[in-house]
Amino acid sequence: MGNEQDEEFKKAQVVDARARNISHNVRCTECGSQSIEDSQADIAILLRKLIRDEIQAGKTDKDIYKKLEDDFGETVLYAPKFDMQTAALWLSPLLVAGVAGGFWAYKKHRQNTNVHIMALDLVRGAPLTPKEKETMLDILTPPPSGGSTPSWWRSWTGR
C-alpha cells in the first residue's frame, strides 16, 4: 500500500512540474504582463486547472500549447513561433541595423569621394566653396603640438 501511495505522489509531482512549466510559458489574457503561473486573475486560475486536466488526460505539452493557441490566439504564448507573419517582427532589428550600417558606409564613402574631388579641383585650379575650403583646412592642417583640438570646436569658436 505504501508503494502505491509513492507512485501516486510521484505521478502528482510530475503533473505539477509539467503544469508549472507550461504555465510559465503562457501569458495571462487578463493581465498581459504576467504568466498564468504568477497571476491570480480568475482566468489564470481556470487556465492552470485546464492545463492540469489536460495533462491528466494524457495530452502532450505540444498538444496543450496548440489548444491554448487555438482558443486564445498566438499572443497567449510568450514564445510565438517563427513564420511568415512574425518574420518582419523577428527580422526588423537586423533590417534596421543593416540600413543604419549602409547609411554610415555611404556617408563615409561620400565624404572620402568629396575630399578626392576637392583635391582634384585644387590641382586644376578650380575655385572652392567656403565649406570645401574649411573641410580641406580641417583635413590638411596638422593638429597643434599641445594637443588635438577637434574640428567641431574650431568651427564653433571660429578659429
Image: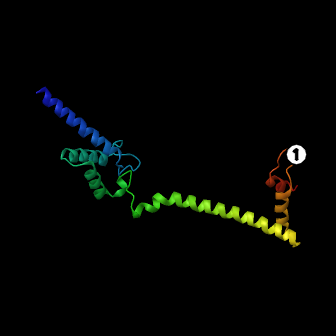
Q: Is residue 76 visible?
A: yes
Horizontal arrangement in the rendering, residue 19 relative to residue 112 (left or right):
left
Relative to residue 153, is residue 124 depicted above or below?
below
Relative to residue 138, is residue 58 depicted above or below?
above
Residue that numbered label 1 is attached to: 145
Horizontal arrangement in the rendering, residue 125 relative to residue 43 (left or right):
right
Relative to residue 122, is residue 51 depicted above or below?
above
Q: Quadrant of residue 68?
A: bottom left
| Horizontal and vertical percent position of residue 82 | 39, 58
| Horizontal and vertical percent position of residue 55 | 22, 45
* Disc 1 element: loop
Residue drawn 74% across and 63% down?
112
CA neighbours of label 1 inside 10 A, class few (<14), some (14 to 19), many (20+): few
| Horizontal and vertical percent position of residue 79 | 39, 51
Q: Farthest residue in the top direction?
A: 2
Q: Nearer the viewer, residue 96 or 46?
A: 96
Q: Nearer the viewer, residue 144 or 65?
A: 144
Q: Nearer the viewer, residue 108 or 134?
A: 108
Q: Nearer the viewer, residue 105 or 149?
A: 105
Q: Is residue 128 visible?
A: no
Q: Quadrant of residue 146?
A: top right
Quarter of the image for the N terminus: give it: top left
